[in-house]
Image: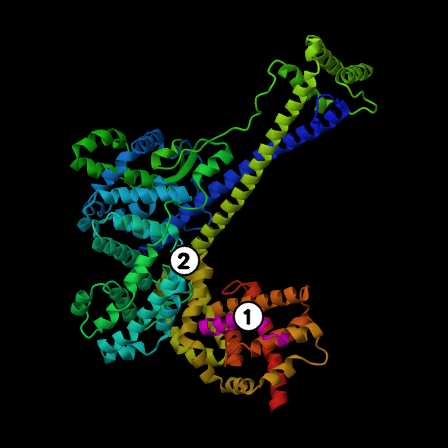
Amino acid sequence: MYSSSSVQDMPDFQRETKEIMASIRLQEDEIKSNRKELFESIKKTQEMKCIYSLSSGYFLHINDNIQQIANLPFVQPGKFVVYKRLIELTNLGSLRSEITRFLSGIYKNSDKLPLIFAKLQTTSIKNPVPFLPKHTEPNHFLAFSTLPALFGHCWTSDLRYSYINFLIKICEKIPYDSIQHHWILDCFKHYIHSSDIQTFLRESIGDYLLDLIRDTTLDLIQQAGQKELYDRIIPVIEKIISKMNANIDLIPMDVRLLIRKFADLALDDAQWLKRVEDLFCKSILAPAISFPKVYGVILPTINLKVASNGVARALQIIASLLLVILHPGQAEFRYPGLDVERLSRLPFESFLRSMMNFKCESLSGLTCTSLLPLLGMHNTSFIFNVQDVAMLAHVLKIVSKEDQEIAKQVLPLISKIPVDQPLDMTFFRYDLWDVQNIGVERPDIKVNTLESAKNKELQAISKSIFNFLPQSQEIPFSPHELFPFLKFHAEHAALGLNTHEICYINNVMHKMKEVPHEKSDEIIVALEDEMRRHKAYSNRNSTLLTQIAISLAEVNSLKASYIAKIDDQLPFLHEKLFELFHDNENSEERFKSKFVSIVICHSSFVDFFTEELAKLKTFLDPIASFAFSGVAKLMHTYMLQKIGVKKFSSYHTLYQATDELFERLSDKDLLDLCITEHTDENVSYFIKNQESFVYATNIFFDANFIEIPIEAIKYIRNAFGIIRKTYALYNGNQPTDSEIEPIIYYLLLKSHVSNIFTFVKYLEHFLDGYPCNTVITSEEYGALKSLVNYITYLDSKVSTKLI
């Protein structure tokens, strides 16, 4: 506003300083509040990532320990507690200070850790230890909990990058021949399993595995001979490789970087390719095919126990053949009757090399380095479990027995850490001040302060005037020049007996009189500079607030993704609990004895399933009551996988007759049914525009393909939502019931589902009749009731038209 110091307009100065200081006060309050919100969101995100890392690790090794795992604190809702400080763990007594000293020593000597872990032999880390939960192998726990905990469970991209480099440094010190059976591969497998690899796997192999799981002929093919089974399987492998090649970009960059850094340790190209193949096949592809539920490859509600022995054998062979595609000699020796030449022609090597062809030496995303300056903090906190501390001490104790030099360094650290007694799974935060110790760039913490004044000599006076102006009262007809303005406000303060303001102004005026006359005009220039510097300070605050808001949104999004991943893990736990219930409660015999009645009569199924739910609740209450809904869904799916639409249809031939009527409808018949003289013109045009229905009809078709009622109704609800949104975009307003009804009718008839009436009746038969949220949500139940009403109306109209 003021380009020249020759113009003095103190009332304008007064108003502007008030605006500047009001803005600064508001900004500083917002910064304090937003930093707190960001900090709390970061802590919650770290906790979610910790839970996800632990659950993905434990669930990968579920066997007979399902009841123990179901009672772990990170599995049960509301039981996962992280203490803010180690000092709060009063039950540990003096051990608290020892743990702090121990972790501090670990991080200060982090450069020595790769050599220490490289010297750790696999055989020495497999024996059970008293401080871990029962059935938990130390090498697995080290891989999915302890080492990730040293890097904050890799919750940011720079921590992931540092952890990858840490693993590679360990590998550098291990001969390649030894790595093949080394515990370090568990670290790779667990890191990849807890990454975003599931999307790539689901898109690349999910549909083909689902086809195999539903293939009822595999048992017969297996009985016919191995060659017939190979002939059925090799086309599946061809499709998988083709699909993987098309989906290379879905492989997370951190996973690709990990594989390439590991491969780059090779001495020649042959070994480089072997390393890529080994890590991709043994840590990603083969485990995902062998355990599709654990890797999120197939729908969580699909029960593999229903699949035939032929399916299990087929999955096993696919996983095994993928390991020998590049080794025809081994394939010919291990699998007599296999068409090795056809297998070796598959472009698997080309896929592996394409996967490694990328330019990236860092990872994008949130970083500690960027977040700490926004928080104004020099330290970050990592979540540890007391058992992690014991595991680190245990490892150091093992290695120190074999290396005297290491023993001298670590024995003083581990002497007081208990490794020979049971320890509770207790979580706490440890503050790390020097993140560069783990390979993370030191953050540049800059505190926002005012710039230095241009005129040091007059700074005290200009600052005093600037501080006075925002506090002063705006008085009409105030003088425009500085000295008269101050004198006028002093007189006004005297009238109001404001002694504090009188003293302040008189002090400023006294200082001004001490300024030489030839420099008196420079006071205004200094005041303008004071205002400029405060404006710049305010602008930097505004930038900081924007950066905090952006980072908060990114952290919240990351937190939501971890929560979703945790939810995606739970169905595998539910499946194991269902298997326990199924084997112990003889539910299979009850199901078989009432099979016909529950397929024919809706009320019989409702009564039977309600009884089973009561038995399930009684069974789960002492073990894992929180898992009731999830296990109930699996129990429902288990039954419906054994029934299916085809068997249901064979008991309801009248439904088939209606399907045939629907099939006889011509395109003109469809339009005549859906568009009447009362139909809105916009609706008519929308229905006639075939492109409006493409996406929704595809989703409806997928619902029929999935067939499992619990999953199918999710697809159908989604299809209804999409067609509503499509029409809203076309029409500019949300559709009314009268507008959407003919559109849905047309959607159902054009869905390319040949047994549409039977399919809807199948869903109604097995989803209606018990409380919402037992197996489907209230929103899905609403979609089901609407669907039934729509198909019932169409049945009456079609029957009238064609019969």
Which quarter of the image is occupied by the N terminus?
top right
Location of residue 420 (image quadrant): top left
**Which residue appears farthest toward the bottom when viewing the image?**
803
Badge 2 element: helix
Tell me if I can see residue 581 in this picture.
Answer: no
Marks 2 and 1: in contact by CB < 8 Å? no
Q: Is residue 45 magenta?
A: no
Residue 323 spot, x, y in % from top left: 25, 62
Q: Which residues are magenta?
A: 687-709
Numbered mark located on residue 304 in the image: none
Q: Amino acid at mark 1?
A: Ala
Task: Name the disc covering residue 696, or none.
Answer: 1
- When asked about the image quadrant of residue 539, the answer is top right
Query: The disc labelled 2 sits on which kind of residue?
Result: Leu
Residue 461 visible somewhere in the drawing: yes
What residue sits right under mark 2 in the picture?
250
Q: Is residue 700 magenta?
A: yes
Residue at left 39%, top 66%? 206
Residue at point 69%, 72% (across, down): 682
In the image, residue 760 lies at what x, y percent? 53, 76
> Viewer-proximal residue, 447 or 703?
447
Question: Is 520 situated above or below 717?
Answer: above
Q: Position of residue 180 (x, y in %)?
A: 21, 52
Seen from the viewer's position, the closer of residues 725 and 70 is 725
- State the separation of the CA atoms marked 1 and 2: 25 Å
Mark 2 packing: few (<14 Cα in 10 Å), some, or many (20+)?
some
Location of residue 599 in the rendering, given as x and y in whole percent from the top left corner: 46, 79
Label 1: few (<14), some or many (≥20) within 10 Å? many
